[in-house]
Amino acid sequence: MLTHASRPLQFVNARLVCPASGRDEIGSLLVDNGVIAEVGPDVRPAARAEQVDCGGHVLAPGLIDLGAFVGEPGAEHRETLATASRAAAAGGVTAIVARPDTTPPVDAPEIVDYLTRRARDTASVRIHTLAALTKGLEGREMTEVGLLLEAGAVAFSDGPRSVASARVMRRAMIYARDFDALICHHVEDAELSAGGAMNEGELASRLGLPGRPAAAEALVLERDVRLVALTGARYHASLITCADSVAIVADAKKRGLPVTCGVSAAHLTLNENDVGEYRTFFKLAPPLRREDDRRALVQALADGVIDVVCSGHDPQDVETKRRPFAEADDGAIGVETLLSAGLRLVHGGDVTLHRLLHAMSTRPAELLRLPGGALKVGAPADLALIDLDAPFVLDAATLKSKSKNTPFDQARLQGRALRTVVAGHTVYPYA
Amino acid sequence: MRPILMADPAHPHPPFPHRHLLGVAGLSPADIKGLLASAEDAVSLSRQVEKKSATLRGRTQINLFFENSTRTQSSFEIAGKRLGADVMNMAVGNSSIKKGETLLDTAATLNAMRPDIIVVRHHAAGAVALLAQKVDCSVVNAGDGAHEHPTQALLDALTITRAKGRIEGLVVAICGDVLHSRVARSNILLLNALGARVRVIAPSTLLPADVERLGVTVFRDMRRGLEGVDVVMMLRLQLERMNGSFVPSVKEYFKHFGLDDAKLAYAKPDAVVMHPGPMNRGVEIASDVADGPRSLIRDQVEMGVAVRMAVLETLGRRLPNAA
């Protein structure tokens, strides 16, 4: 699919926003052979190029979504590479980093290879693969880190599971460090949060639901930071959700440890009160926390303590959501709404556009050592043309994902992708 | 479509504005007082030889119990029959439709049978509200997980009112497994709504997070917690929670949190004792106390039928095709 475009493409009258360089100016960008050939205010019109007048809208590096569930293999009724990538394209996302907790899990090189070939044949955006950190995601034995890297895995993760054993985690870190591989870890102590349905606190108590304490997250994160200090491994906490975790990461960074962290757009824009009267579409894992926590996350994003904003994309069949709250499955889709939800923070004056896009494109590219995330000559022409201000009311039925479990149904959002380009190909045209 | 409800001249309370009774949360003090006043009438009716009224004649009531509960189900059944309804019991506690994934299918199936009122007990919090969204009839929550059990709180309020003449200003202590108790949650809401001062007494492992924010004062020492209280409400402690998981042992629990005469002596001399049943004698309550002169436990059962009659009658008047 991602063959190089034959005819050059030129974006003119664009507001060029490059979070990697800080560039923010009106200019033009020329794409040739799938890469950025020229960029800047003084690029001359190329006669043979197809011209796209951007009307002054933002042209930015395409978003890179670190850690989305794409359904293949094994859960094609929830999502496929084709549907996930259509959703991604509609949201300005040009690369999905797929979670390894599939069936079977991505714990062997041949599965990485399978996904690479499936993606080549069916996906319209780039698909990168997270490989399992432990065999069968069981938290006991490490996977073939070297072979998985050779097969194309970009980092290692046990998906939505935490490695409970400090001994196993330490060994995995030491071994991964020899390959300079990144470990993306889900930080939540499964025992402490066992049986929990939502954030522990007054609201859960009122609803009569068992709680998941924020301490279950901080506990694992603190342990991991100590193991990073011991091993020197490159470590990324996939999703943090509470103020305590922000403090732990900030402290680790101050000490110069190779620790980074991510947050989902849902956790940045919603809180536990959105659960209301048992609304299962707001049942996430880790759960939505208190408003104080949300505000701490937003501040941490603004301050750069949080590196990555991702979607936490987790498609669920509607039947598994139409259950009593405690029995409903966790998770929400989000790849298509990642940009629009994130822009709420920009419109609200909480973070700058550059900061948001840096966390959605530049920084994930750096952490995963991927080309992209920058508007520079020679970089892949993975681009998002964004109307920052277009207001709309989200209708879940129009979303491209196979599953429609969005917490943003009927939400008023502002700003959306107008066109998404992968390797010089337009994979999404709005209207 | 909504009929204009005339206030019943016998009850000067405003008409009940809800189609379902899903919880005490959402009820106004006027709603609660209206239901309690109706329940007083039902007590009188139930004490006559001729116990039947025709209020719900022609109506179909289904008792849908996903959890077994002989007491509550019988109470609702008698209440419905005294009002003239056709009552059907569906005990699904042991059948294949126990699991949550078919709850909505069950709801759709039952709805097609055109019942007028469904009484539901379910093991999951929020399940009754979920079911209520999918049916055309009225729904009564007979207990959903650790969330609410509104008719229990109403019957407790009726029992207290009849014993003490009021609720406002009373000090009520709720003792025991508040964490897993829907009875405690509904009672905390209702007693607060009617102006009582509510205490909870329990080991911290049996208290929900941030419980003080529900409007209670917390005591971990039962003697201090019982000082000066008018009403002692004991809660049932499930046996499986007593062997080290939430409290170390039955022996230790009874020593510290079981209600015996010695601890009850700290309460007001005229304090009354209540328990929603079924009791674990010798675990949370001593037999002397349970059967003693201050116990209202039998009265609670009688008031249970009356309150459920009041609820069914009140919702029956609200049904869209009501006469």
Image (tube, rainbow, N blue to C red):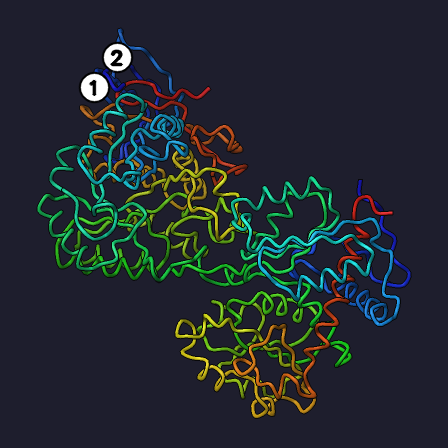
A74 on left or right of B175: left
- Contact between marks 2 and 1 (CB within 8 A): the answer is yes
- What residue is shown at x 51% (from left), y 53% (from top)? A273
- What residue is shown at x 42% (from left), y 58% (from top)? A195
Q: Which residue is mark 2?
A: A8
Q: Which residue is mark 1?
A: A37
Q: Is residue B322 above or below residue A419?
A: below
Label for residue B282?
none
Q: Amino acid at mark 1?
A: Ala
B181 on left or right of A186: right
Displayed quadrant of residue A16: top left
Q: Amino acid at mark 2?
A: Pro
Using the numbered discs, state the Cα–Cα distance from disc 2 to disc 1 in whole angstroms. Answer: 9 Å
Tell me where residue A194 appears, x and y as whole percent: 38, 59
A241 on left or right of A40: right
Q: Residue furthest front?
A: B95
Label 2 crowd bin: few (<14), some (14–19), many (20+), radius 10 Å? many
